[in-house]
Amino acid sequence: MKILKIEFQNINSLRGTHIIDFTKAPFTTSSLFAITGPTGSGKSTILDVISLALFNQVPRLGKISRKEIEEKGAILTRNQKEAFATVTYECKSGEYASTWSISTARTGNLKDYEMQIAEVGSGELLDLKKSEVPARNEALIGLNYNQFIKSVLLAQGEFAQFLRAKKEERGELLEKITGTGMYRQLGIKAFEKFREVNAVIKAQQDRIVVIKDELLENEKKKKISKNLQQKEQESKSLEATLKTISKSLELKEAIKTRKKEIQVLELNKDAEENHLKEFHAQFGHSLKQHEKLQNHAEDLRTWSHQQVELQRIKEDKKIKENGLEKNLQEQQKCLESTGKFTGTEITSENISDELECFSRKVSELQQKRSERSTEYKTLKLQLQRELENVSFSLNEKDPDASLKTLNELKNDSEKAIEALQKQLKNIDLERCEAEKHRLNKALEEAMNAKQEQDKLDQASAAIEKLDKESELLLPKIAAFPVEITTAENRIELFKERRDKLDLEKHNQVLRSSLKEHRAHLVDGEACPLCGALEHPYAEELPKQDSELQKKIVETAAELKTWTDKLTEATTSFKHFDDRQSVINGQKANLEAELKADLSQFKEKFPQFQIEENRDWDQLFRNYRTQLQQLEAYEKEYGKLKAIQTAIPIHFRLNGVLSEGVEVKAQLDKLYLGTDIHKDCGQFQQTWTALKQDHTGLANQLKELEIRIEKQTEIFRNLEHHLTDAVKAQDFSTIAEARKALLPELDYNQLRSRREKIKNDLDIHLNSLKLLSTQLQNLQKQDVEKTAETLVSELKQHQDLFQSITSACEELRRKLQNDKDRREQLEKLEAGIAEKEKQNKRWKLLNELIGDSQGKKFNDFAQDLSLSQLLQHANIRLADLSDRYKIDKPTAQEDDGLVAIDEHMGGQRRSVKTLSGGETFILSLSMALALSDLASRNVEINSLFIDEGFGTLDPETLDQTLDTLEKLQSESSKTIGIISHVDSLKERIATQIQLKRHGQGYSTLEVTS
């Protein structure tokens, strides 16, 4: 597999369309190239394009979808609406181009991605759904996605980490790098399968315990079986008795049914006998007469048909004779009408020639008339176009009057122009458009000046209005401070009065609260408050002051009234004062604006002075009048020019019209129709049709005469034969016999009715005899008991039988359940034995590779993978450096990989002690080794190696590049090195350079 070309648009930071063609220079001269550029410029984007176009995946993100692009802002370049990635590659099957693309709908939303594969040679697309494209690329290339990125896109940075990792970490990294995670899964599966089988066996053993508890004991089972036998015997005896009683009841019901059936049959028999008598009375004689003539029926019908047919042929002959005579009359009429049409003498011999001559003559006149008509229409249209802006209507009936009208219009127009020239004496009529522009501009400036003066007037009016409002506010503002002071004094007064009344009210309340205690004081008993034994105030209690509450209410009302007045006065004062401030500010602004507007008006409109009573409307009317007069002059001047041009056209029009009238007169003498060829053709067709009809009628008349002669002879022979036959059957004439003969359908229907009546009567007689015999036999078998007695006995025995049957069913169910449980127990025990036998291999497999983490088998597999990888790595390392080999650690060494230093006598040292350059050499050899492993069944001719060259010293870098060049030359591989090392620019001439620009975009350039 070899990549031939990469083409992409708007992928990540690389905006626009980019093409990297490995089949063209400079890649054809040097297949070793570098992809260089600063960090973030888009070097890895080129690798993303390759994997995206082939597999719809990129190493950093995985599978790509519309949701992935929208949420992460990946792949599609910012602010762009479409993107694509195409990789053209060569494989064993041929050359193919795989494309991934995405675009934005008209709604602004991103569409889903699309993928396709085209055969490069033919350009034909493979018939694939987009989901099938990655799988087809995998089949064509021979590598799946994971193998591809490990064998073509080599991210050797992973191996640098792999070299220094501990054993546990190295296993995980190796699993990730080689994609051999299946071994861990196999170990887990073996463990889980063994656990699953054991769980099934345990569940079955638990089920066996439950079933054994539900089994019947032997004594109980025998007792149930014996009881069942007894119940079954009783059931059989009852069943026989039930059958006997049921049979007796059925017998009684059958006797009753037979008696009813016999009564019905006797009635039906009588009805059928009466029906047969009625049929014989109505149709018997007709059937007898018909059956006498049955042998001659066909001949009689033929005689009747021949008679009718002979009459019909004679009538047809008469019709044809009449038609022949009428045809000759129509031929003569046709010759006369044709002669009248052409105006010549017409005979049957010259009709066609005369019609053709007449048609040609008329056609020539029609052609000439059509030419004059076309010329007339053309001139008329030309005249109308010239006079489309002139109030003129062509008088086709009187052309001279029309021409006179044109001359009058010309004179009127000249007079109107002369009058307008006098009105527009100050206007340069040679420059009408410039004058119109000047007048329009003057009118526009006047209108703008009026608008500006209106604004000045409005501003002056607004200032005047504010002055008037201010004059009204000043007295109000001056009065409010007095009102506020008065209100504040009154509020203070009423507050003091309210406080005094509240204090008095409080004392009264205190006295009232002791009233109840004073009422209960008794001399000689201690007071609960002071302990006194005498209570002088207990006798005369103080009276409540009823006027105090009234005063408190009045004071509160007065206080509220003055408080409201203070609030109102304060609010109004603030409102008016604020409004006065606003007025002062607005007035100052308006005065400043008015002054500025006045200055601007004088600068802008120096030709107009500010006047209070200027008549702007009159000024506008003067300008508009001049404009209207100028437009009227232009219109009238154009009208005059049109009339002057139209008069010569009108002269030519009159001449053509005269010629056309003359041709029309000649044509009207000959022909007034519209289609001469059609009319002549109709005369010719009519004559031809009449001649053909005459020939046909003559032939048909001859055939009818022959048929009449033959039919007459046949009819006479048949009539002679039938005369003797009908007389032998007592009929005087053939007609009488034919009348007696019934229609075959009627005869068959009547005969069928007679046979049916007879058959129905025989059936009823036989059925009556059979039912009578059956009734006698049934009566002999009948029992003496009544039906009511038998029904009662049947009910009693059925109830008992049902009870015993239910008991038997319950006993059988218990025995069957026990049997089913024992069979289930046997199957479970056999199944457990079989599963234990099968589980031996799972047990062995679990012991060998199984554990819950899959670590046992994974470690074994990764050790084999590591050995194979190290073997290939050492082969690649020999090309890069003859100093080192890589080996697994021994039991005495730590668990890290070991580098064998051949320059130090095979000394073993940990790879952790290597320098950065040495580590890069070893990791690159392992990356190339993994590529060899992944592609051992597929020839890989394209490699991309990502980063790491910055750690190399110049000598090692040269050696590494020598090795890669050697690898490229030996295998014809295309090898790309991704790096930002400057020294690579000197060593590798062919480069794909990426440069960052503003707004996060980059550009791509191929240099050599």
Image (tube, rainbow, N blue to C red):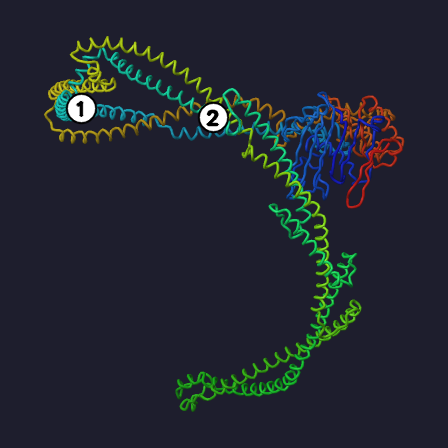
Name the amino acid type tagged 2: Cys
Q: Quadrant of residue 632?
A: bottom right
Q: Secondary structure at mark 2?
A: helix
Examine the rendered structure and indicate whether residue 814 appears above or below residue 748. below
Name the amino acid type tagged 1: Lys
Give 324 or 338, whichever is nearer the viewer.
338
Q: Residue furthest front?
A: 345
Q: Residues within 10 Å of mark 2 (few under 14, many from 20)?
A: many
Q: Residues within 10 Å of mark 1 (few under 14, many from 20)?
A: few
Examine the rendered structure and indicate whether residue 146 appears above or below residue 479. above
Q: CA distance from mark 1 to mark 2?
A: 103 Å
Report the quarter where the C terminus lies.
top right
Tag count: 2
**809 left or right of 901 in image:** left
Q: Which residue corresponds to mark 1? A: 247
Q: Which residue corresponds to mark 2? A: 334
Give 737 or 875, whichever is nearer the viewer.
737
Q: Secondary structure at mark 1?
A: helix
**67 left or right of 870 in image:** left
The reply to whether discs 1 and 2 touch (Cβ–Cβ < 8 Å) is no
Q: Earlier in the sequence, mark 1 or mark 2?
A: 1
Q: Can see residue 539?
A: yes
Report the quarter where the N terminus lies.
top right
Residue 607 in the image, given as x and y percentages of width and height = 79, 69
